[in-house]
Amino acid sequence: MVNPDDRALVIAVLGLGEAGSLIARDLVAAGARVRGYDPAVAAGPGITDTGSEAEAARGADLVLSVNSAQAAVDAFRAGQPGLGSGAVWADLNTASPGVKRELAGIAEAGGLPFADVAMMAPVPGRGLRVPMLASGDGADRYAGLLTPLGADIEVLTGPAGLAASKKLLRSVFYKGMAASIVEALEAARAAGHEQWLREHIAAELAAADARSVDRIVDGTARHALRRAAEMEAAADMLTELGVPPLMAAASRAVHERLTGSG
C-alpha cells in the first residue's frame, strides 16, 4: 500500500496488547510500514519498535491508539508533538462518547483530523478485518487508508462519539444479556438444574425473531409490577444458593422503575 507520492504507507500503532499486536501484524502483512509503541510489550516481527508515542507517530500517515480508554487522552497528548501535517489520529479504544469528544477537541485545536473507531467484534481470529464503525472528521480518511489493506469499516455520518455511542448501546444489550445468562446458569448449577436451563435458554434464543423485541418491551412494561416481585423472589433464591444476585437485583430495579413511570 502506497500513498499518492509513491511512498509506503506509514502507520503507528500505540498499544501492542492482544488487539494492537494482531492489527499491527496484519498491517505489516498488507505492506504498510508499521511503527509500534508499548511501554510493556516489545514490538513483533516487522514492526519498528519505538521509545514513545511521539517517536512512533513521527512520519506516520495514520496513528492507531489501541491502548485503553483510561490512557487514550494522555496517549494523544504525548503523541501529538510527533504528528506531521495531514496525519490522522484514530482512537480504537472502547471509551465513552464523552472521551471521544474530548479527543476530537484536542485534535481540532491542533488542526488534526480525528476518527472515533469502534471495533464491533473480538479482534482475535479477525485482526485487521474486525468490523469497525468510524465517525468524526477523520473517518473518511481513516477508511480510505485502511480499506485497501483489507479492513472492514463502515463510515458513519456524524461527529466523534457517534461510533462509540452505537457500540456501547449494543453493549448494554449484549453484555447485559450475557451477564444474566452467566448468573442464571451459575444459580442453576448450584440448584442442580444447569442442563435443563441451558436447553431452555438455547431454545428461547433459537426462536427469537424480529417480533421478539416488541414482545419483550411491551410485556415488560405491561407486567412490570408482577415481574418486580418475581425478580425479588428470584434474588432471594440466588442468595439462598450462595450466588450473588447482581443481575436479578438489577432486573428487579428496572421493573420497579417501570412501575413508577406508569
Image (tube, grey):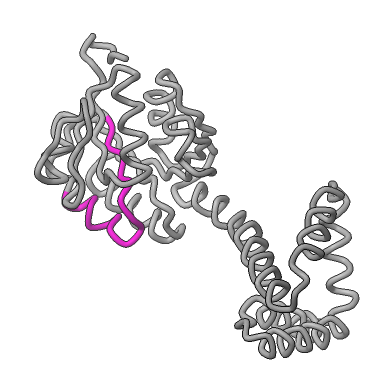
- Residue at the front extreme, as displayed: 192
Nearer the observer, 215 or 197: 197
| Left or right of 151 in this view: 226 | right
| Left or right of 118 in this view: 84 | left
* Residue drawn at point x = 38 percent, y = 43 percent: 19
Nearer the observer, 176 or 220: 176
Looking at the image, residue 249 lies above or below residue 175 = below
Picture quarter with the C terminus: bottom right
Picture quarter with the N terminus: top left
* Residue drawn at point x = 23 percent, y = 52 percent: 75
| Residue 237 place in picture, x, y as percent | 74, 87
| Residue 153 place in picture, x, y as percent | 50, 31
Counting labels gives 0
Q: Tell me where residue 176 sits by quadrant.
A: bottom right
Residue numbers of the magenta segment: 62-78
* Residue drawn at point x = 51 percent, y = 40 percent: 133
Residue 99 shown in magenta: no
Q: Tell me where residue 170 sits by quadrant.
A: bottom right
| Residue 184 place in picture, x, y as percent | 70, 71
| Left or right of 113 in this view: 215 | right
Q: Tell me where residue 127 sits by quadrant.
A: top left
Looking at the image, residue 230 lies above or below residue 31 = below
Looking at the image, residue 209 lies above or below residue 45 = below
| Residue 96 place in picture, x, y as percent | 45, 60
| Left or right of 41 in this view: 50 | left
* Residue drawn at point x = 53 percent, y = 44 percent: 120
Looking at the image, residue 223 lies above or below residue 233 = above
